[in-house]
Image (cartoon, helix red, strand yellow):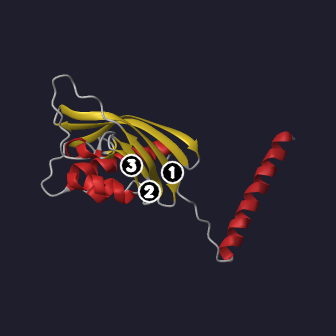
Amino acid sequence: MRPRHRDATRRARFLVLVVAAAATSAAGCRIVVQPEEPSLEDAVEQMLERSAAAWNEGDLEGFLSDYADSPATTYIGGGGLLEGIDAIRAVYAPAFAPGAARDSLRFEAVRTRSLAPTLGIVTARWVLHQEDSVTASGPFTLVVRRSGSGWKILHDHSSSDAPAAGAGSSSDSGGEPAGAGGDAEEAGASGEAGAPE
Protein backbone atom coordinates (compact mmCIF):
# COMPACT_ATOMS: atom_id res chain seq x y z
CA MET A 1 0.00 0.00 0.00
CA ARG A 2 2.94 2.31 0.32
CA PRO A 3 3.36 2.77 -3.48
CA ARG A 4 -0.31 3.74 -3.92
CA HIS A 5 -0.03 6.30 -1.13
CA ARG A 6 3.01 7.87 -2.84
CA ASP A 7 1.23 7.94 -6.18
CA ALA A 8 -1.82 9.59 -4.62
CA THR A 9 0.41 12.20 -2.94
CA ARG A 10 2.19 12.96 -6.21
CA ARG A 11 -1.13 13.29 -8.05
CA ALA A 12 -2.46 15.62 -5.36
CA ARG A 13 0.64 17.84 -5.58
CA PHE A 14 0.36 17.93 -9.35
CA LEU A 15 -3.32 18.91 -9.17
CA VAL A 16 -2.53 21.68 -6.69
CA LEU A 17 0.09 23.06 -9.10
CA VAL A 18 -2.33 22.87 -12.04
CA VAL A 19 -5.08 24.61 -10.08
CA ALA A 20 -2.66 27.31 -8.84
CA ALA A 21 -1.41 27.93 -12.38
CA ALA A 22 -4.96 28.11 -13.72
CA ALA A 23 -6.02 30.48 -10.94
CA THR A 24 -3.14 32.87 -11.50
CA SER A 25 -3.73 32.76 -15.26
CA ALA A 26 -7.43 33.47 -14.85
CA ALA A 27 -6.70 36.35 -12.49
CA GLY A 28 -4.46 37.98 -15.08
CA CYS A 29 -1.32 37.17 -13.14
CA ARG A 30 1.71 35.74 -14.77
CA ILE A 31 4.58 33.85 -13.35
CA VAL A 32 7.92 35.43 -14.15
CA VAL A 33 11.07 33.38 -13.89
CA GLN A 34 14.07 35.59 -13.21
CA PRO A 35 17.20 34.62 -15.15
CA GLU A 36 19.97 33.38 -12.94
CA GLU A 37 22.70 35.98 -12.39
CA PRO A 38 26.20 35.00 -13.43
CA SER A 39 28.50 33.81 -10.68
CA LEU A 40 31.10 36.20 -9.30
CA GLU A 41 33.76 34.28 -11.23
CA ASP A 42 31.87 34.54 -14.53
CA ALA A 43 31.00 38.21 -13.97
CA VAL A 44 34.63 39.11 -13.22
CA GLU A 45 35.83 37.18 -16.28
CA GLN A 46 33.40 39.17 -18.45
CA MET A 47 34.38 42.41 -16.72
CA LEU A 48 38.09 41.91 -17.35
CA GLU A 49 37.50 40.85 -20.96
CA ARG A 50 35.48 44.06 -21.54
CA SER A 51 38.13 46.13 -19.80
CA ALA A 52 41.02 44.72 -21.85
CA ALA A 53 39.04 45.08 -25.08
CA ALA A 54 38.22 48.72 -24.29
CA TRP A 55 41.86 49.42 -23.38
CA ASN A 56 43.10 47.81 -26.58
CA GLU A 57 40.53 49.76 -28.65
CA GLY A 58 41.39 53.09 -26.99
CA ASP A 59 37.93 53.42 -25.41
CA LEU A 60 38.46 55.28 -22.11
CA GLU A 61 34.80 55.31 -21.08
CA GLY A 62 34.46 51.60 -21.89
CA PHE A 63 37.60 50.92 -19.88
CA LEU A 64 36.22 52.82 -16.88
CA SER A 65 32.65 51.45 -17.19
CA ASP A 66 33.26 48.62 -14.71
CA TYR A 67 34.21 51.04 -11.93
CA ALA A 68 31.44 52.22 -9.63
CA ASP A 69 30.47 55.74 -10.76
CA SER A 70 30.97 57.19 -7.32
CA PRO A 71 33.20 59.68 -5.53
CA ALA A 72 33.84 56.84 -3.03
CA THR A 73 35.49 54.61 -5.67
CA THR A 74 39.22 54.40 -4.95
CA TYR A 75 42.37 53.45 -6.83
CA ILE A 76 45.84 52.98 -5.41
CA GLY A 77 48.85 52.75 -7.68
CA GLY A 78 52.39 54.07 -7.85
CA GLY A 79 51.07 57.62 -7.76
CA GLY A 80 49.20 57.09 -4.48
CA LEU A 81 45.51 57.18 -3.65
CA LEU A 82 42.94 58.45 -6.14
CA GLU A 83 39.38 59.05 -4.93
CA GLY A 84 36.42 59.10 -7.28
CA ILE A 85 35.87 57.98 -10.85
CA ASP A 86 36.64 61.50 -12.13
CA ALA A 87 40.14 61.42 -10.59
CA ILE A 88 40.74 57.96 -12.09
CA ARG A 89 39.49 59.18 -15.48
CA ALA A 90 41.82 62.22 -15.36
CA VAL A 91 44.86 60.00 -14.78
CA TYR A 92 44.05 57.65 -17.66
CA ALA A 93 42.89 60.29 -20.15
CA PRO A 94 46.38 61.06 -21.56
CA ALA A 95 46.90 57.37 -22.41
CA PHE A 96 43.66 57.45 -24.44
CA ALA A 97 44.33 60.73 -26.25
CA PRO A 98 44.35 60.52 -30.06
CA GLY A 99 47.73 59.19 -31.19
CA ALA A 100 48.80 58.06 -27.71
CA ALA A 101 50.92 54.90 -27.63
CA ARG A 102 49.36 52.12 -25.57
CA ASP A 103 50.59 48.55 -25.44
CA SER A 104 47.99 45.75 -25.55
CA LEU A 105 46.49 44.60 -22.26
CA ARG A 106 45.57 41.15 -21.01
CA PHE A 107 44.87 39.67 -17.58
CA GLU A 108 46.27 36.47 -16.10
CA ALA A 109 45.98 34.31 -12.99
CA VAL A 110 42.54 35.68 -12.08
CA ARG A 111 41.15 34.45 -8.75
CA THR A 112 37.87 35.48 -7.16
CA ARG A 113 36.52 35.03 -3.67
CA SER A 114 33.05 35.89 -2.43
CA LEU A 115 33.03 37.84 0.83
CA ALA A 116 29.23 38.19 0.97
CA PRO A 117 26.39 37.70 -1.52
CA THR A 118 27.02 41.17 -3.00
CA LEU A 119 30.73 41.64 -2.24
CA GLY A 120 33.82 39.97 -3.65
CA ILE A 121 37.58 40.26 -3.93
CA VAL A 122 39.60 39.65 -7.08
CA THR A 123 43.35 39.08 -7.38
CA ALA A 124 45.15 38.75 -10.69
CA ARG A 125 47.96 40.06 -12.85
CA TRP A 126 47.81 42.68 -15.62
CA VAL A 127 50.16 42.31 -18.56
CA LEU A 128 50.97 44.94 -21.17
CA HIS A 129 52.53 43.49 -24.28
CA GLN A 130 53.54 44.08 -27.87
CA GLU A 131 52.91 40.85 -29.77
CA ASP A 132 54.83 38.21 -27.75
CA SER A 133 56.98 40.68 -25.80
CA VAL A 134 55.85 41.74 -22.31
CA THR A 135 56.49 45.46 -21.75
CA ALA A 136 55.07 45.80 -18.23
CA SER A 137 53.13 43.73 -15.73
CA GLY A 138 52.09 43.52 -12.11
CA PRO A 139 49.62 42.20 -9.55
CA PHE A 140 46.35 43.83 -8.57
CA THR A 141 43.49 43.42 -6.13
CA LEU A 142 39.93 44.58 -6.73
CA VAL A 143 37.03 44.88 -4.30
CA VAL A 144 33.81 44.47 -6.28
CA ARG A 145 30.16 44.91 -5.32
CA ARG A 146 27.02 43.68 -7.07
CA SER A 147 24.31 46.27 -7.56
CA GLY A 148 21.36 46.73 -9.88
CA SER A 149 23.79 47.42 -12.73
CA GLY A 150 25.90 44.31 -12.08
CA TRP A 151 29.30 43.88 -10.47
CA LYS A 152 31.31 47.11 -10.19
CA ILE A 153 34.81 47.91 -8.91
CA LEU A 154 34.77 49.82 -5.61
CA HIS A 155 38.50 49.68 -4.96
CA ASP A 156 41.49 48.88 -7.17
CA HIS A 157 45.01 48.46 -5.79
CA SER A 158 47.48 47.87 -8.61
CA SER A 159 51.24 47.47 -8.56
CA SER A 160 53.95 47.19 -11.18
CA ASP A 161 56.66 44.54 -11.26
CA ALA A 162 60.21 45.85 -11.10
CA PRO A 163 61.72 46.16 -14.57
CA ALA A 164 64.03 43.35 -15.60
CA ALA A 165 67.72 44.12 -15.13
CA GLY A 166 68.99 46.11 -18.10
CA ALA A 167 65.49 46.68 -19.46
CA GLY A 168 64.22 50.17 -20.10
CA SER A 169 60.88 51.31 -18.81
CA SER A 170 58.09 51.24 -21.34
CA SER A 171 55.75 53.14 -19.13
CA ASP A 172 56.19 56.65 -20.34
CA SER A 173 52.68 57.03 -21.66
CA GLY A 174 50.75 57.35 -18.41
CA GLY A 175 48.58 55.14 -16.17
CA GLU A 176 48.08 51.53 -15.30
CA PRO A 177 45.19 49.55 -16.59
CA ALA A 178 42.46 48.85 -14.11
CA GLY A 179 43.23 45.73 -12.20
CA ALA A 180 46.69 45.77 -13.66
CA GLY A 181 48.63 47.57 -11.02
CA GLY A 182 51.17 50.29 -11.25
CA ASP A 183 51.39 54.00 -11.76
CA ALA A 184 48.90 55.99 -13.72
CA GLU A 185 51.81 57.88 -15.22
CA GLU A 186 52.73 54.69 -17.03
CA ALA A 187 49.23 53.84 -18.23
CA GLY A 188 49.73 54.88 -21.81
CA ALA A 189 52.35 52.30 -22.49
CA SER A 190 51.86 50.18 -19.49
CA GLY A 191 48.54 50.13 -17.86
CA GLU A 192 44.91 50.69 -17.19
CA ALA A 193 42.98 51.86 -14.17
CA GLY A 194 43.18 49.05 -11.70
CA ALA A 195 45.98 47.64 -13.76
CA PRO A 196 49.41 48.85 -14.72
CA GLU A 197 50.61 51.99 -13.14
Q: Is residue 163 visible?
A: yes
Q: Nearer the viewer, mark 3 or mark 1?
A: 1
Q: Residue at point 72% right, 61% down?
A: 17
Q: Earlier in the sequence, mark 1 or mark 2?
A: 2
What distance separates the C-alpha of mark 1 from that of mark 2?
9 Å
User: Residue 185, relative to residue 127: is it above or below?
Assistant: below
Q: Left or right: 130 with respect to 71? A: left
Residue type, numbered disc 3: Met
Asked if the residue under mark 2 is in contact with the one under mark 1, i.e. CB atoms within 8 Å, the reply is yes
Residue type, numbered disc 1: Arg
Q: Which mark is residue 40?
A: none
- Residue under pointer 1: 145
Q: Left or right: 92 with respect to 35? A: left
Quadrant where the N terminus sits is top right
Q: Residue at point 22% right, 48% down?
A: 56
Residue 181 pos. (x, y %): 34, 39
Q: Is residue 58 visible?
A: no
**Which of 129/72 is in front?**
72
Q: Which mark is residue 47?
A: 3
**Crowd rating for badge 3 (residues with CA inside 10 Å; few <14, some 14–19, many 20+):** many
Residue 12 falls in image quadrant: bottom right
**Residue farthest to the front, as pictured:** 80
What distance separates the C-alpha of mark 3 from that of mark 2?
12 Å
Q: Which mark is residue 68?
A: 2
Residue 51 pos. (x, y %): 32, 49
Residue 73 pos. (x, y %): 44, 54
Q: Earlier in the sequence, mark 3 or mark 1?
A: 3
